[in-house]
Image: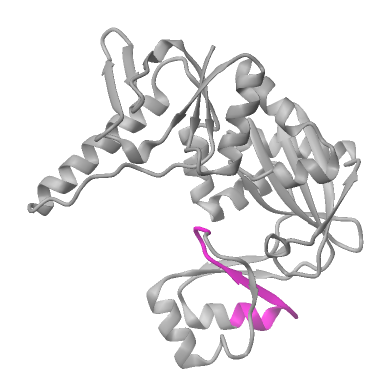
């Protein structure tokens, strides 16, 4: 059974999953897209649906024989610098188009899919979709309009901000951030996500196929991802919330995800985000949840 790991050996989670798959009897190889097209070769015939993947180590795989791909990290493609910028752009577009075809054509199962990955990049849309299936979400504004941002911040007692796309940790909005000259300059560069701060407890739920594993995350940080000493306490999620986890995963086309919640003192769960390729090794070690085992099962089924 051929299974690929999207990423490389330098990523601890990619290496962990590859090792677990090998121990389970699968043939696992890395698919490092940053090596395409110089060292990684892809061939595809739409009229026959046949294709081949030649890895940098010389291993050639029939695309039809690849059971699944574990999406850990996507590095895009690497195109060397051309003297002609237009030719370089053509080479980049052609390489990405070929790679996207590989990700979507044929019978290979991607955990998670290209479509799910695209959905994750549009975080405001993800919030909206979660609300549509029944989740409570924080009051949220995505904007580069200084007046709208200021008005929103004045509406709530505490407000946080974070990038629209992701890539940086959450911070509290301060008076200094709202200083008109600074705010105008910042928002002229890019929009920002502003949210009401939800007081309460951090909860993370891992959804793998039809299984849901949840723990409380005890941390004083506004963004617990910054806290290496955060305490993880396994909890039993209410049945209604387990069903909601599965509904959110389905709506976002995720077969595997980590959903972050904030639970208010009233007991109400507020949806924050669903990650299509979450880190989990530390979580698994602290809680004892069989995440690796379930993930391997999903990739091999």
The answer to whether residue 230 is visible is: yes
- Residue placed most toward the observer, 102 or 190: 102
- Residue placed most toward the observer, 104 or 55: 55
Q: Position of residue 67 (x, y in %)?
A: 52, 15
The answer to whether residue 209 is visible is: no
Magenta residues (range): 151-166
Q: Position of residue 83 (x, y in %)?
A: 8, 53
Which image quadrant for residue 294? top right
Q: Quadrant of the N terminus?
A: top right
- Residue placed most toward the observer, 292 or 48: 292
Q: Residue at x 66, y 24 (%)?
A: 296
Question: Could you tell whether 194 is left or right of 159 in the image?
Answer: left
Q: Residue at x 41, y 36 (%)?
A: 32
Q: Please say if 295 is above or below 91.
A: above
Q: Quadrant of the C terminus?
A: top right
Q: Position of residue 298 (x, y in %)?
A: 65, 22
Which image quadrant for residue 61? top left
Question: Could you tell whether 235 is left or right of 114 in the image?
Answer: right
Q: Position of residue 58 (x, y in %)?
A: 33, 20
């Amino acid at each position: 059974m051929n299974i690929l790991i999207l990423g490389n050996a330098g990523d601890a989670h990619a290496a962990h999953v590859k090792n677990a798959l090998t121990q389970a009897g699968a043939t696992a190889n890395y698919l490092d897209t940053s090596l395409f097209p110089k060292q990684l070769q892809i061939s595809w015939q739409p009229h026959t649906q046949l294709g081949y993947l030649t890895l940098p180590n010389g291993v050639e795989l029939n695309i039809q024989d690849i059971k699944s791909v574990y999406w850990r990290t996507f590095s895009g493609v690497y195109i060397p610098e051309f003297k002609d910028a237009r030719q370089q752009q053509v080479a980049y577009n052609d390489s990405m188009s070929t790679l996207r075809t590989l990700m979507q054509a044929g019978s290979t199962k991607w955990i998670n899919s290209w479509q799910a990955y695209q959905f994750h990049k549009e975080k405001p849309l993800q919030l909206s979709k979660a609300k549509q299936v029944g989740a409570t979400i924080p009051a949220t504004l995505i904007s580069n309009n200084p007046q709208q941002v200021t008005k929103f911040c004045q509406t709530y007692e505490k407000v946080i901000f974070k990038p629209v796309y992701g890539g940086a940790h959450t911070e509290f909005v301060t008076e200094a951030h709202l200083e008109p000259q600074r705010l105008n300059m910042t928002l002229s560069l890019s929009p920002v996500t502003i949210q009401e701060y939800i007081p309460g407890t951090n909860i993370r739920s891992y959804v793998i196929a039809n299984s849901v594993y949840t723990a409380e995350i005890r941390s004083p940080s506004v963004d617990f991802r910054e806290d290496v000493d955060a305490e993880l306490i396994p909890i039993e999620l209410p049945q209604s919330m387990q069903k909601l986890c599965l509904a959110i995963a389905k709506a976002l086309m995720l077969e595997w995800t980590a959903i972050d919640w904030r639970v208010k003192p009233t007991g109400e769960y507020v949806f924050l985000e669903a990650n299509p390729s979450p880190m989990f090794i530390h979580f698994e070690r602290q809680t004892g949840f069989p995440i690796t085992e379930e993930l391997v099962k999903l990739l091999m089924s």
